[in-house]
Amino acid sequence: MKKLWVWLTVIVAIIVVAVLGIVISQHQSNHKSMESSNFTKNQTPTLFLHGYGGSANSEKYMVKRAEQRGVTNNTITAIVSKEGAVKLKGKLKSGASNPIVKIELEDNKQGYLDKNAKWFKNVLVKLQKEYHIKHFNFVGHSMGNLTFAQYMMTYGKDNALPQLNKQVNIAGTFNGVLDMNEKVNEISVDDNGKPSRMNPPFQQLRALKDIYNGKNIEVLNIYGDLEDGTHSDGRVSNSSSKSLKYLLGDSPKNYKESLYKGKSAQHSQLHENKAVADELIDFLWEKQEH
C-alpha cells in the first residue's frame, strides 16, 4: 500500500510539473506574440558586424534577444574567408520578417579598413545577388563601426548597391583607441562632437557628412562609461565614440546618443547587455506612431 502511495505521489507530481510547463510555455508564447505585434514586419535584412578579434559569437546575444522578443525567426551567418569570399550559412526565407545576417570575418585581426570595407561590400553583393535585397540596416561593435564608416566612404554613393536605412553603432572607435593612439582623458569633444585632437583617419571620415546627406538614414550611437574616472568603457573613450556626431553633422534623418554606465557598460559587455539589446531592437524595428 505504501508503494502505491509513493507511485501515486510521483505520478501526481509529474502531472503537476507537466501542466505548469504547458501553462508557462503558453504564457511566454502569448507574451512573445503580443510583443511581436509592436514591431514592423518587412524583408529588410539587418547586418551585424563584430569588432577586432571578434566573431559571430559577439553578435549572438543581441540576435537571440531579437528572436526572444518575436522580432524575427530568420537568422543566417555570412562567413567571409581570408581572401574575401562570402559563404552564407542558412537561407533567407521568402517573406520572412526582419531577417538578420551575422557576419563573421575569418581574418578578424587585420586593421586595413579598405580591405574590411570591401569584405563588407562582398557580403552585401552576395545578398543582393541571391536575394535581390535593396535596403539594409547595420549594427556594429567596436572596430566594426570603423569598418562600416570606411564602407560608406568608399561605396556609400554607389546607387547600384543596397542602400542603408538605419545604423546602430556600439562602442565606436571613430577617433582612437585607448593605449593605442589615445591616453585616458586626453581628448575631449564639444557639444557638436568635435574632438580636441583628430586621430587618423578621422579627417578623411569627415566626408561622411556629405555621403549621408539627404538619404534619410537614422543613427543610434551607443557607448559605455565604467564610471571609474576614465570616461571610457575600458577600451574606447567616450570622446572617441561621441565624435561620430561631428562626422555626420545634421545629415542623418535623426541621430541619437545613448550612454550606459557601470560594469555592464564595459567594452565587451555592451553587446551582452540586455538593455542595450532592447534599445537597438526598439530603434530598428518598433512601429512608429504617426
Image: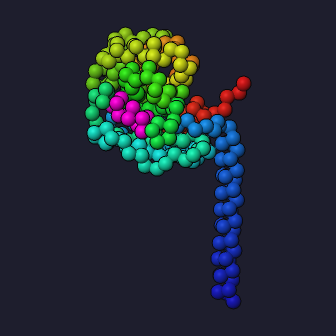
Q: Position of residue 16 (x, y in %)?
A: 69, 68
Specify the quadrant that holds the N terminus: bottom right
Q: Is residue 229 visible?
A: no
Image-based side of 174 in relation to 83, left or right: right
Specify the quadrant that holds the C terminus: top right
Q: Position of residue 151 (x, y in %)?
A: 39, 26
Residue 216 placement: quadrant:
top right
Residue at (27%, 33%) from the top-left corner?
Answer: 110
Asked if the stretch drawn in magenta spans residue 134, the answer is no
Image position of 267 with respect to 89: above or below: above
Q: Which residues are magenta?
A: 116-126
Q: Position of residue 33 (x, y in %)?
A: 68, 47
Residue at (54%, 27%) from the top-left corner?
Answer: 165
Residue at (66%, 57%) from the top-left corner?
Answer: 25
The residue furthest right is 290
Image-based side of 128 in relation to 36, left or right: left
Residue 180 placement: quadrant:
top left
Q: Nearer the viewer, residue 44 or 229?
A: 44
Q: Position of residue 262 (x, y in %)?
A: 47, 32
The residue furthest bottom is 1
What is the number of callouts on the image?
A: 0
Residue 172 placement: quadrant:
top left
Residue at (40%, 23%) from the top-left corner?
Answer: 155
Dominant SS of magenta comes to: helix
Asked if the stretch drawn in magenta spans residue 117, the answer is yes
Image position of 48 with respect to 153: above or below: below
Image position of 13 with respect to 101: above or below: below
Q: Nearer the viewer, residue 254 or 45?
A: 45
Q: Is residue 77 visible?
A: yes
